[in-house]
Image (cartoon, helix red, strand yellow):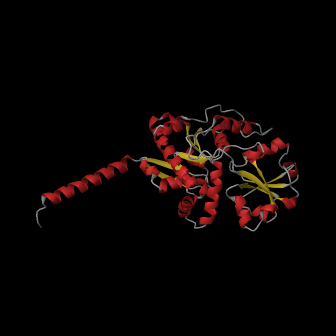
Amino acid sequence: MSKPTLFHRSILAATLLAAGLGSVQALAADKVTLQLKWLPQAQFAGYYVAQQKGFYQDAGLDVTIKPGGTDISPVQVIAGHAADVIVNWMPDALAAREAGVPLVNISQIYDKSGMMLTCKKASGIASPADLKGKTLGVWFGGNEYPFFNWMAKLGYKPDVDIKVLKQGFNVDPLLQGQADCISTMNYNEYWQLIDAGMKADELITFAYEDQGASTLEDGLYVLDSDLKDPAFVAKMAKFVKATLQGWNYAVSHPKEAAEIVVEQDASGAATQEVQERQMENVAKLIPSANTPKMGYLEPAAYRRTIEVLLSGGSSPVIKQDPGDAAMSHGVWEAAAKL
């Protein structure tokens, strides 16, 4: 074997140095585990885009995105310390906080509600006043809170004035005539009805946003105790900044965002057409995209959600006002400075 020349030794040294630096950078990456509220779909496009486009990596983060499902509760996951941050709706987060899981909102992605009650016009429903005596499909698992608040405002008591059908995460109850109305999102289930052959003029929708019962939906939540650690706050600031970068890109490039989401769907059920349409409707819930305020939790919207949840008649969602304890602008402000 010939003796390595100076040139070869220099190349070897450079290669080893590069490998060493790569290892150091890999070790230096902060690990973050994100738990989503549901399966891969454009509802979460910003996170998948941030990962696919390298925004998390560029921020020095090693992010694991865990999809949700029918048997997965983001609250239970973070309570068991199996995630650093979760995507959740504020009603569920505040109810969980009152029950002993001290969740804190660090960034609000959606500033409008996409939740609707969709009904067949053939059921004789033209306004909320016509809901009395009807069977209404409702999602549970935390999603029922805005519905019951709305019914309380209308003066309707479940199982007295209305029949509540515990709805699965599909549109079958309306298609099969088991319910007069079902819960839908403007970016998902409503379009499933259209894809199933129903026509828009056969349906009437009541958006929670228009009924004075809207509450904040997809936001990022962490445990209160973790925010006492400056290193954790710094890590979350990098995560929020990269995440908002992902959402900005997804809103501006709906087709590419849809492609990225479809790639993440292990079941193969997601299609480009459906996810692109969903992305376009999700974008309507993020009007602050590409602005400095994107991801900022507006105090007025936070207070409105709390007031909705407290005003549930004899069975309010939460019994005590958490004040400002369930929200923090610290991470968002730190992210804005990066």
* Residue 251 visible in image: yes
In the image, residue 41 above or below residue 314: below
Nearer-the-camera pick, 186 or 20: 186
Work out whether 251 lies above or below 332. below
State which quadrant residue 316 falls in: top right
Residue 270 shows in this picture: no
Q: Quadrant of residue 71?
A: bottom right
Depth check: 100 or 240 in front? 240
How many numbered marks have been drawn onto this rendered protein structure?
Answer: 0
At horizontal 37% and vertical 51% (from top left) the residue drawn is 26
Q: Which quarter of the image is occupied by the N terminus? A: bottom left
229 or 47: nearer the viewer: 47
Q: Is residue 119 above or below residue 78?
A: below
Image position of 317 (left or right of 256): right
Task: Give the camera-side residue of 267 and 237.
Answer: 237
Quadrant location of the C terminus in the rendered image: top left
> Residue 8: where, in percent of width, then height?
17, 60
The spot of residue 225 in percent (x, y) is 53, 36
**Spot occupied by residue 157 in the image (x, y as percentages of width and height):** 84, 45
The percent position of residue 156, horizontal first and vertical second, equals 85, 45
**Residue name at image x 13 percent, y 57 percent:** 6
